[in-house]
Image (cartoon, rainbow, N blue to C red):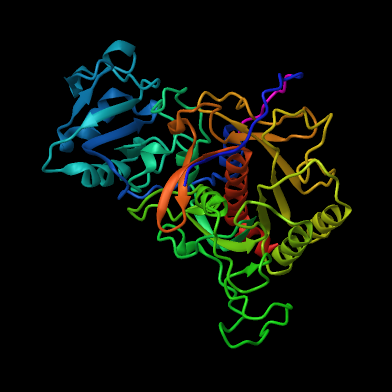
């Protein structure tokens, strides 16, 4: 199924300064990167038969020569050339180290001695301040093996669609630190989820307090056999998606990552709570939205993704989101797709003045506001990839669809789940600290 959401052609009346989701990721990376131990393991990847050794300045060249005599090393100079150690002179920069410290030397040792033995010998010498391998560092990225990953410019933009390289959410850098936790539950309040999709099935939330198909409300939450969420449209236990929108959104948030299959979500490991409040035509009744919001936070979802909207104010929905707010629940909402200034003409639920709401506009593969996206200097909070205002669907968002399929959609409904996924990553990484405090 291929869907492009409707857009009005009205001219934008107000510019909006966009904090893209890439900024959110940079902040997340800064906060989540934990310092490593100062005692590096020698088993870390390093250049074989090479050592960095720092001599104490008071040792002098002769003592350094004596310390290294058993190793028979060669010195690597500032040009990367090997020179005899006897030519090393800490007083002459060009002939000694190129490492910014005349007493820090880059050595190559014979293969028969090797890195570990050389370091052990050097550390036992009183003239040596420290010795360590020539460690190999790498770009802090984690590239998954999912075959459709190259299509996902929203997660890693290499210019594959003709857009701007780097106009993405920097997901690969976050995954190098953390790729999600199954202890984090995100409620997808949408048209349902194809919970049998092979790229989603492992990440579907299961109500472990409920015994399936026994026709008893085992957990006493008011819903009988709600083992995999709830269908508020038909009022039954089966939240299967019959539209496609909810399944597409779910893949953006949490398609299983690094499983050699299909796509990858922002959060590789997660629990997606399927709450079907929208019907086959993509219409959502207010009563079903309220029930779904209440179900989400009452049953353990710390975050919900909401891709529906209207320009009608609803006190019932406002109150439901407020109840969720009081429980510590984060409500992520799509800003809308009508090129509307939400400051002047509010779109709901994104524009309710409740502190737990994050309103999300859509950006394209050039890191610009998508032409169809709503905006608002005060009512919209963040931008995330939602797909370009273009008939070229490769510039849209590729994700999961029902019946084990994949396809393109675009809109702020595709932008919001990027934010929900980032929030889930952050929450999962912080869970140990939350639980201990």
| Direction from residue 311 to residue 70 in the image, left or right | left
Compared with 265, 383 (above or below) is above
Q: Nearer the viewer, residue 187 or 179?
A: 187
Whether residue 299 appears in magenta in the rendering, the answer is no
Q: Which region of the structure is painted magenta? A: 15-20
Q: Nearer the viewer, residue 56 or 7?
A: 7
Outermost residue toward the left? 112
| Direction from residue 423 to residue 401 in the image, left or right | left
Query: Which residue is rendered at x = 45% and y = 40% of the image?
Result: 172
| Direction from residue 95 to residue 126 in the image, left or right | right
Residue 358 pos. (x, y %): 72, 43
Whether residue 18 appears in magenta in the rendering, the answer is yes
Compared with 214, 103 (above or below) is above
Query: Which residue is rendered at x = 69% and y = 77% of the image?
Result: 223
Residue 35 pos. (x, y %): 52, 45
Query: Which residue is rendered at x = 68% and y = 66% of the image?
Result: 232
The answer to whether residue 147 is seen in the rendering is yes
The answer to whether residue 176 is seen in the rendering is no
Most common secondary structure along the magenta stretch: loop
The quadrant of the rendering that contains the C terminus is: bottom right
Compared with 199, 48 (above or below) is above
Outermost residue toward the front? 281
Residue 430 pos. (x, y %): 62, 54
């Amino acid at each position: 199924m291929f869907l492009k959401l409707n857009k009005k052609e009205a001219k934008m009346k107000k510019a909006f300064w966009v904090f893209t989701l890439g900024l959110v990721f940079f902040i997340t990376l800064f906060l989540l990167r934990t310092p490593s131990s100062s005692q590096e393991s020698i088993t870390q990847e390093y250049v074989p038969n090479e050592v960095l050794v720092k001599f104490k300045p008071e040792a002098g060249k002769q003592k350094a020569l004596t310390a290294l005599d058993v190793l028979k090393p060669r010195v690597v100079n500032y040009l990367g050339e090997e020179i005899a150690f006897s030519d090393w002179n800490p007083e002459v920069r060009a002939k000694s180290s190129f490492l910014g410290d005349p007493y820090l030397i880059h050595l190559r040792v014979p293969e028969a001695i090797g890195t570990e033995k050389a370091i052990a010998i050097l550390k036992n010498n009183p003239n040596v301040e420290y010795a360590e391998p020539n460690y190999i560092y790498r770009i802090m990225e984690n590239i998954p093996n999912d075959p459709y990953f190259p299509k996902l410019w929203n997660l890693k933009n290499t210019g594959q669609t003709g857009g701007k390289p780097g106009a993405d959410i920097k997901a690969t850098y976050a995954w190098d630190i953390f790729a999600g936790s199954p202890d984090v539950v995100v409620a997808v309040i949408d048209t349902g989820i194809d919970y049998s999709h092979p790229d989603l099935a492992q990440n579907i939330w299961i109500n472990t307090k409920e015994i399936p198909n026994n026709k008893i409300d085992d957990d006493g939450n008011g819903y009988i056999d709600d083992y995999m969420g709830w269908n508020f449209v038909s009022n039954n236990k089966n939240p299967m998606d019959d539209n496609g929108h909810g399944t597409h959104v779910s893949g953006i948030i949490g398609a299983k990552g690094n499983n050699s299959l299909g796509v990858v979500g922002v959060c590789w490991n997660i629990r997606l709570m399927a709450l079907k409040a929208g019907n086959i035509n993509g219409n959502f009744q207010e009563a079903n939205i309220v029930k779904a919001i209440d179900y989400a936070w009452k049953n353990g979802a710390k975050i919900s993704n909401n891709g529906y909207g209207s320009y009608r104010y609803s006190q019932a929905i406002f109150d439901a989101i407020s109840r969720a707010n009081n429980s510590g629940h984060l409500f992520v909402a799509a800003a809308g797709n009508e090129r509307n200034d939400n400051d002047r003409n509010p779109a709901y639920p994104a524009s309710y003045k409740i502190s737990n709401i994050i309103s999300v506009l859509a950006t394209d593969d050039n890191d610009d506001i998508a032409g169809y996206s709503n905006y608002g200097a005060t009512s919209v909070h963040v931008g995330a990839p939602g797909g370009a205002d273009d008939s070229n669907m490769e510039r849209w968002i590729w994700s999961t669809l029902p019946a084990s399929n994949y396809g393109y959609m675009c809109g702020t409904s595709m932008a919001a789940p990027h934010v929900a996924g980032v929030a889930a990553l952050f929450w999962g990484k912080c869970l140990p600290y939350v639980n201990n405090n």
